[in-house]
Amino acid sequence: MIKIDFNCDLGELSDGGALDAAVLPEITSASVACGFHAGGPAEMERTLALAKLCGCAVGAHPGFPDRANFGRTEMDVSPAEVRGYVLYQLGALAAFCRAAGVRMEYVKPHGALYNMAARDCALAGAVCEAVAAFDPSLILLGLSGSLMREAAQSAGLTFASEVFADRAYLPDGSLAPRGKPGAVIEDMDVISRRVVRMAREGVVEAIDGTLVPIRADSVCLHGDNPGAAEFAGRIRAALEREGVTLAPLREVVG
């Protein structure tokens, strides 16, 4: 039996939670923005309440302190700064989790922090050091095939490999930069076929047509897309139609 987690980045929009509420019934894990790149106290509290209502697992989604660029612009930061950024944001979300009676299950860095840590050993180590210091039982969710796996193992953390439904890949397994044509995939039929292939075959077609081997513990759909709710429903239906079981992250990786 093939089992996979389906996560979405939520709590990032100031729309009263309408889009998040529509997406949550279709997914198994909610990666909640912690206030640096997007979101804030009201969004965290609201998103956790919605996730609890839907029985959806919750993870922290910490990013760079760069709201102007939605945390998607690389910054010149030291490992010590990254460790502090992550610890600070985990503490913020943990307070709201405790108040809501919700358990934080995993940590998934956001945007530029995610991509930089995927290829930089020192930054990957800083992220993992922060997570392990905060709560070593937390799962680290990172890009399949990246340096985050080794860093997590060194820190004694459980690592889960993530793949992306709506992002193009380069031949080396990294994500195509958002400024590159075709980096963000919008064709729903293409997205559905890609996700099923990633789950069942363990490969994804790169932007140049080559096949890249991946491990798909969790598939991500970005929640800041206006069509996210429809996309989430169709992805879920496509996976279930192909015999893939959707389950929360901890059930997938243990």
Image: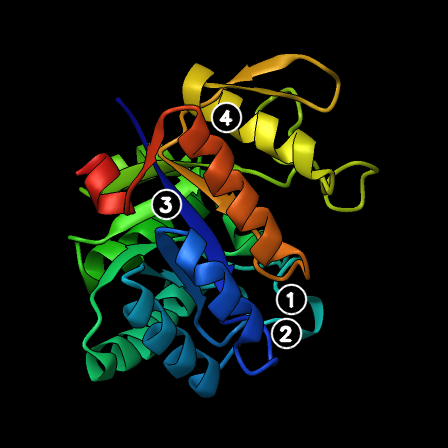
In percent of the image, x 20 and y 60: which residue is there?
133
Query: Residue under circle 1?
Result: 70
Pinpoint residue 209: horizontal percent, then vertical percent: 72, 15
Q: What amino acid type is highlighted by mark number 2?
A: Arg
Query: Judging from the image, what secondary structure is the residue with disc 2 in?
Result: helix
Real-space Cα separation, disc 4 to disc 2, in angstroms: 33 Å
Instruction: Name the kind of residue labelled 4 in the image.
Output: Val
Q: CA distance from mark 3 to mark 2?
A: 22 Å
Q: Dot 4: what SS?
A: helix
Name the side, left or right, on which 72 lies relative to 138.
right
Q: Amino acid at mark 3?
A: Leu
State the residue at coordinates (57%, 57%).
229
Front residue of this view, candidates 87 and 2:
2
The residue labelled by disc 2 is: 67
**Spatial CA span between label 1 and label 2:** 5 Å
Label 4 or label 3, whichever comes before in sequence order: 3
Question: Within the image, what quadrant is residue 77 found in?
Answer: bottom right
| Residue identified by numbered label 3 | 141
